[in-house]
Amino acid sequence: MFYFGHVHEELRYKSKKEVISIAVNILVYHDGYMNDVVCAKKKIERNNAMNKKNIEIEPENMRWKYFSIRDNFFKYDAYHIISEIFNILKIDKDKGFSCDNMNFGKYTFAMLDLLAKAQLVTLESEIQFKTVLEAMNKLIPNNSNSLYYELMYDIFIFKRLAKKRVRQIIDVKNEHQLNHDGMIHSEGLHIDTALSIYLKEIGLINESEKLMQEVLSCRFPLN
C-alpha cells in the first residue's frame, strides 16, 4: 500500500490481492484547516499548485478535478463552476445533462453536490436543478443533501420573489394607484399588513415590526 498524489493523497495498492479493512476506534483531531493555520501556511495557494500537478499526471481522474473546484469554490464564479462540472460529468458533451448522460465514478456524487451548491447561487433553470438532485438520489437514495438543497432552493426563490413584491407594494403605495373603496380596509391596512410580512421575510425585521405595530394600533384584525 502507498499514498498517491501531491496533495489530497489517496491510499493505493501495489498488489491486486484482496485487502482486508479493519475499523479502529481512534479519535483524531485535525487542525490543519483552521483559518489561522490556512492563512499562515498559505494552504490554498499551496494546495492549488500541488493539485495542478495531480491533474497533469492523471487528467481524467475526477478526484483531482473535484478537489480543484472544491478548494476554490468561493473564489470561482458560480456560472464557471456549473459549466465546468457539467463538462466533466457529461459523457456526450453535445447533449444535455441527464442521468443517462453522466459519468459515474467514486467522485460523481461529490461533484453533483458542488454543482447543486453553485446552482443555489445562480437560481437558474429549476428543471436543470431538479435533474441534478435526481442524479444525487439515484447514486445515494434518500440522501439528506439533495433534500436540503431542494428546501433551500425553495426558500431562496421565495425570498427573491418577496423582494420583488416589496418593491411592487411600495411603488403602488407611493403612486397612489390602489383603490380601497369597498375593499378589505378603506385605508389600505390590509396592504400594509402584507408589506410587513414580506419585509420580515427578506430580513428587514425592524421595519416589519414598526409597520405591524402601526397596523395593530389602528385595530386592524390580522386573521
Image: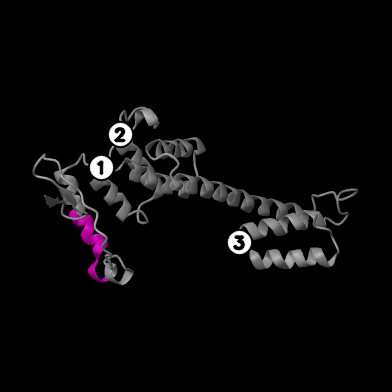
* 55 sits left or right of 187 in the view: left
Q: CA distance from mark 3 to mark 1?
A: 40 Å
Q: Is residue 45 magenta?
A: yes
List the residue tagged with mark 1: 62
Q: CA distance from mark 1 to mark 2?
A: 10 Å
Q: Please, what secondary structure does the residue beneath circle 2 have?
A: loop
Q: Are marks 1 and 2 in contact (CB under 8 Å)?
A: yes
- Residue at the far right: name it: 182
- The mark nearer the N terminus, 1 or 2, is 1
Residue 69 x/y as whole percent? 31, 50
List the residue tagged with mark 2: 103
Highlighted range, magenta: 40-50
Question: Residue at 45% of width from left, 40% of height from top?
Answer: 133
The type of residue carrying mark 3 is Gly
- The mark nearer the N terminus, 3 or 1, is 1
Residue 129 x/y as whole percent? 47, 39
The type of residue carrying mark 1 is Met
Residue 193 x/y as whole percent? 76, 57
Res 174 visible: no
> For the stretch drawn in magenta, what is the main secondary structure?
helix
Q: Please, what secondary structure does the residue beneath circle 1 have?
A: helix
| Crowding near the residue tagged with mark 2, few <14, some 14–19, many ≥20 C-alpha atoms within 10 Å | some
Q: CA distance from mark 2 to mark 3?
A: 41 Å
Q: Nearer the viewer, residue 139 or 184?
A: 139
Tell me the number on the disc at residue 203: 3
Quarter of the image where one finds residue 135: top left
Mark toward the viewer: 2 or 3: 2
Q: Please, what secondary structure does the residue beneath circle 3 have?
A: loop
The type of residue carrying mark 2 is Asn
Q: Is residue 211 above or below residue 98?
A: below
Question: Residue at 31% of width from left, 68% of height from top?
Answer: 34
